[in-house]
Amino acid sequence: MYPFTFANLIRPLTHPKPHYIWVKVLILHETGKAILVSKDPKIWIPKSRIAKIRLKNSVFEVYVEEHIIE
């Protein structure tokens, strides 16, 4: 209702928005809770951390928080 309240002014300092990125991956294995992907090293990504998955030009891309895939 009021955009300039004290709580809204300090919120970016206490709870910053997560930064999401699209990452091209090769999916190696899938379980009920996670996906094994091949980026530089093979890593497990929990399905709860994946926001979106798309197929673009025959390549899978996942939309995840930046700190998950480094």
Image: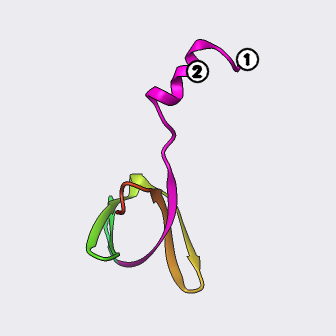
Q: Farthest top residue?
A: 6
Describe residue 38's horizontal placement relative to residue 57 as left or right.
left
> What residue did someone put label 1 on?
1
Assess disc 1: are there few (<14), some (14-19) or many (≥20) residues with their C-alpha within 10 Å of its C-alpha. Answer: few
Viewer-nearest residue: 30 or 11: 11
Residue 19 sits inside the magenta stretch? yes
Above or below: residue 22 compared with residue 25? above
Q: Is residue 17 magenta?
A: yes
Instruction: Say which label, 2 or 1, has the lower sequence index.
Output: 1
Q: 16 or 37, which is in the foreground? A: 16
Horizontal and vertical percent position of residue 44: 29, 65
Residue 9 image position (x, y, % from top left): 58, 21
Q: Is residue 62 visible?
A: yes
Q: Residues within 10 Å of mark 2 (few under 14, many from 20)?
A: few
Above or below residue 65? Residue 14 is: above
Outermost bottom residue:
58
Q: Which residue is mark 2?
A: 9
- Identity, as a three-letter code, of the amino acid under mark 2: Leu
Query: Which stretch did the figure color magenta?
Result: 1-27
